[in-house]
Amino acid sequence: SDVCSSDLVPESGNPKLDLLVGLADALDWQVGDVAESVWNEQPDNTCDQELTFEELRPLALAAFHEGRHADLNQIANRMLGLAQTAEERARGSYIASLAWDGVGRYSRALACLQEALTERNLSTELLIFLQNNLANAHYSLWHLLEAKAISQDVIARLEKMPIEGDLKMQDALAFSHYVAGNTARRMIETNCPDLPMRAEEARRHLRRAIELYSDALAVEDNPNWAGVVNTCRGALIEVDAADGNLDPLAAVEQISNGLDAVIDPEQMPAGDLL
């Protein structure tokens, strides 16, 4: 009772760090999540407030491809506020996960995906997208066993489906191999006795991802796919250097040569290629 409110929240409206830390400890939250909950909110100026859920979807897609993650987060919040069905709630959470992933908040992305997957009777397409991104969130957080299990489960499921000619599902299968391959690559660092096995596993998945994305690029010019292909090639350089198939100095030279294409980052599309 002897503590003035100004001691906790100054005139700026921004609470002191020790208060945020105390709240985070009491709630068992991350400090950043507490800060976001109590911080002064910025107005949502990303789109017309009268837009419907379906009208917001192309805006979300454009924000994602253009790397406008703050706008994407606001659009996702709008979609979640409008969601009426399990499919819409899950899709809104999925879009929110993409926004958090884009700014490196992988724990938040993971939580959004887990929330989405609590919904029942989702379409097969959305379920696969959610599981793929769940695997990627675990990979980003170095939860390698979880990432491996989920990505390989999605691969097994998609390989049993007639997806030829379906670019969305080919993209999903390629992305599953991308996550599985990079997970195996990271496992080289954590379990050296299994290096030959992990290196071969990484190569198999990464090469398959490149093959699938290259096939899709022959049908549709998509800079995001081209970027992921480039990332897979970079990962293969690392794998080859790790198991002795490539001299480390030669690996560095290859990576350095690749940077020549990105002299001006402002001229590069957002995403993997940058």
Image (spheres, helix red, strand yellow):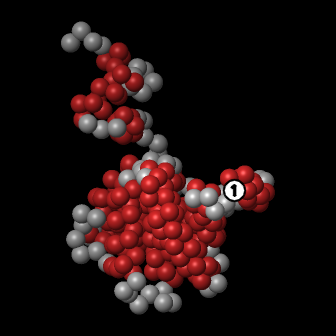
Residue at the location (38% across, 53% down)?
143
* Near-viewer residue (141 or 255): 255
Left or right for 167, reference 156: right
Q: Is residue 189 left or right of residue 144?
A: right
Residue located 35% across and 15% down the image: 7
Does residue 120 lie above or below 31 as drawn? below
Judged from the image, the secondary structure of the residue bearing numbered disc 1 is loop
Crowd class of label 1 (few under 14; some 14 to 19; many from 20; radius 10 Å): some
Where residue 3 sits: x, y (%)? 27, 12
**Mark 1 residue type:** Asp
In the visual, does 48 lie left or right of 158? right
Quick one: which residue is furthest to the top in this view? 2
Quadrant assignment, res 241? bottom right
Q: Residue 11 at what x, y percent from top left?
A: 43, 21
Return the residue nearer the eye: 71 or 271: 271
**Which residue bears the numbered disc 1?**
247
Quarter of the picture holding the N terminus = top left
The percent position of residue 136, horizontal first and vertical second, equals 43, 60
Residue beneath the point at 40% across and 24% down: 17
State which quarter of the image contains the C terminus.
Answer: bottom right
Taking the image as shown, residue 161 lies to the left or right of residue 274, namely left
